[in-house]
Amino acid sequence: MTLIEAILDSLAGDAPVQEARGNRNWIAVWSRYCGLASTLASAGSAGATVIDAARLIGRSARELARLALSHDPLDAALGMAAVNSLLDVDESRCEERNGRDIVIEHAAGKSVALVGHFPFVPELREVARELSVLELRLRPGDLPATEAARVIPEAEVVAITGTAFVNHTIEPLLGYCRPEALVIVIGPTAPLSSVLFDFGVDIISGARVADPPLVLRQVGEGAEFRRIQGVRRLTMQRPACR
């Protein structure tokens, strides 16, 4: 069973979709809760609608969640947003901390592989003994994502963007991590589900929507995630995580 299949199997019950919004970079689905996922789109035209929200209203969120298995990026993003809209997150196991702070804290003095070019890369370079940034759309200093099989096994700390669920690279990336490495999955797409711990993840730094109407409106207006209000940053750790 794949990681995404295991997450789908862990979902309890179902709920109809109350509302959905999308822009070029993000999708939000509101069913039991409101879930977010990245569309993996390139930058630009942030306000462009990428989903037909009207056709989703009233549909089974569990049915939409199955789209997370799709190899079409837009369908997969819609599926992951639906997954996150159904997840019953055990907040007693979470702390309200930003994934950026978690990664920087654990990176101090370590060799780090970061999958995805996050805005905090400059701060990470200051504290990590060695940093390799793997990215599909290269920026100065990045390595191509195709170098993952070479770079990740050498890292003491591996931080993987949650968008790896959308392009189905999450399992290969986890497979490259050496057993003693600290593995962090980070970003709003990342499901705050303990199922990830069974697949080698130590820490999940994700998001929980506190104000669905506000978040849906901002996504519909094309806002970038870092500017979206009404979202809590939560971190869940595997028991006995070092």
Image (cartoon, rainbow, N blue to C red):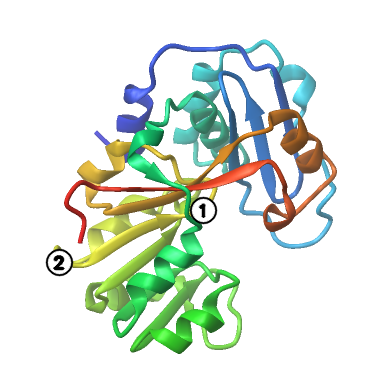
Q: Residue at x 38, y 26 (%)?
A: 8
Quadrant of the rendering where the N terminus is positioned: top left
**How many numbered marks does the figure carry?**
2
- Is residue 92 something one can see in this rendering? yes
How many angstroms separate mark 2 from mark 1 (CA)? Answer: 23 Å
- Which disc, if any, is residue 70? none
Residue 79 screen position, x and y as percent: 54, 32
69, 87: nearer the viewer: 87
Q: Residue at x 81, y 48 (%)?
A: 222
Q: Disc 1 marks which residue?
A: 187
Q: Quadrant of residue 177?
A: bottom left
202, 211: nearer the viewer: 211
Which structural element holds mark 2?
loop
Q: Residue at x 66, y 35 (%)?
A: 28
Q: Viewed as shown, does residue 155 lie left or right of 15?
A: left
Q: Quadrant of residue 34?
A: top right
Amino acid type indicated by mark 2: Glu
Quadrant of the rendering where the C terminus is positioned: bottom left
Q: Disc 2 marks which residue?
A: 180
Residue 54 screen position, x and y as percent: 79, 20
Residue 94 screen position, x and y as percent: 38, 43
Q: Residue at x 37, y 31 (%)?
A: 90
Position of 18 relative to 2 (above/below): above
Residue 165 screen position, x and y as percent: 45, 46
